[in-house]
Image: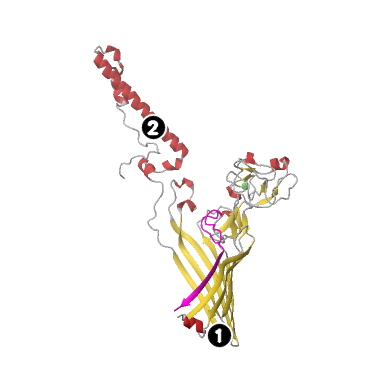
Amino acid sequence: MAEHTPRPDQPRLRPAPLLFEPAQAASDPEHFFDLESIEDPRALLERATELTLAFRAAADRATEFQAMAAAQLADPRRFDRLSTADIAERAECGNPDVHWEKVKKTNFGIDYSFFKGMVTGKADFFRDRRTDILILGANRAIPSYFGVDAPVANLGIVENKGYELELAFNKRLGQNWRLWANLNYTHAKDKVIEADDAQLLPEYQKRANKQISQSYSYVSAGNYNTWDELYGSTIHDNNDGQKLPGNYYIIDYNGDGIIDSKDNIPYGFPSNPQNTYNATFGVDWKGFSLFVQLYGVNNVTRQVVFSSLAGQNHLVYNEGSYWSKDNPNADVPLPRWLSTASGYTSGNRYMYDGSYIRLKNAELAYTFEKSKSFIKRIGMESLRVYVNGNNLYVWTKMPDDRESNFAGTGWASQGAYPTVKRFNIGANITF
Ligand SMILES: [Ca+2]
């Protein structure tokens, strides 16, 4: 291994060389220490300077040893079983066997048509089994006394199963009427089969047997209404002194007498919906055509955070009534200003059932028949005029209109974008 240069944030691991060897000083003490016998003041100055430099170097060297010892105390694994050069250079082990993950896809589908094509559709079933998924070293079941971060390895297995159903209906009634509909339903559910979880982790902390986007939350159970109840509540591992009456009791899920990150538990559904619905209904009558499209999802949990008067970043949002001594059954806890409670204080306050049904599109159009003389007279082949709208209405338990699918880690500010309502008036002209 090449000679290494310590990074500025690390103590040197090889002390600087001394200007003289202690053995040398011991064998010839007069030369080094008997300054009084030196008569020439210039020689005395030289000797004194030499000694000063030597002592300074020795002091520096002692400081370096001290820093090394402190670093070793702070992070003993850096020094285990490795040479000093290794300790300075290596923070993580490589894995030369890393390779692409594999997927085995199984699909099965049926197409059908009934009543002379009035009802058509298909059903598709799928099952994907992905193996050799990369697991990061920090997420592996490798104890810290391994010495360095564990290597990345192809150990994960995830299965994704589901089905998709489609149904289309199309019926003409006499000369002028046509009714039609398209219905889709997709169900998809993934499951982590293997994630190199540490064996002794409790089941709720393992990633295995859960969905990839499983939601997690601290869970609240009512408010504490008096100072006595507050003092009797389980302590939080940070900012415990910022509790106020009217805050939530947070459930000490693992019963260890403290609220900390181990009480963040799988909560509700994943943040990606398990079920997706799409339904479009249309009717044509003479030149008129009308359709509405509904789109919906369910089995989804969505975190929507409104920190109105909760910490130090304030948004104002109407969240209902707030707790007070005289209103203990309020919608939200006591507001606070310029004091920050622990991150657990909100419990599951911002976790919502993310299901919704949206009136996604609606359109009314009129197509002028070719035989209409005025169309030809102004040189047009056809003319269609329409008025339509997008995202016209939403039915949901979420506090406002937003999609359930979103980017980021689940914090509402990431990828949450308000849905825009839009109206269009237009014409399609063919010359
Ligand atoms: Ca606990």
Q: Nearer the viewer, mark 2 or mark 1?
A: 1
Three-letter code for the amino acid on which mark 2 is drawn = Glu
Which residue matches tag 1?
117
Q: Is residue 53 left or right of residue 140?
A: left
Bounds of the magenta segment: 405-431
Q: Secondary structure at mark 2?
A: helix
Residue type at the position of mark 1:
Gly
Task: From the image, tell me which residue sits under label 2.
Answer: 64
Q: Position of residue 287 (x, y in %)?
A: 56, 81
- Quick one: label 2 or label 1, which is nearer the N terminus? 2
Write the residue at 40% across / 30% down. Answer: 63
**For mark 2, does the 10 Å Cα neighbourhood hold few (<14), some (14 to 19), or many (20 or more) residues?**
some
| Residue 22 covered by magenta stretch | no
Magenta stretch encompasses residue 408: yes
Report whether 82 appears left or right of 218: left
The residue lying at 31 percent from left, 29 percent from top is 18
Of 239 and 393, which appears nearest the observer?
393
Identify the residue shown where x is 48% and y is 71%: 105
Vertical arrangement, residue 147 with respect to residue 59, above or below: below
How far across and down, in percent of the image, does residue 197 sit?
A: 52, 55
User: 335 above or below 22?
Assistant: below
Task: Let me know if residue 162 appears in the view.
Answer: yes
Horizontal arrangement in the rendering, residue 369 relative to residue 334 (left or right): left
Residue in the foreground of this view, choosing between 110 and 199: 110
- Choose between 300 and 201: the one closer to the eye: 300
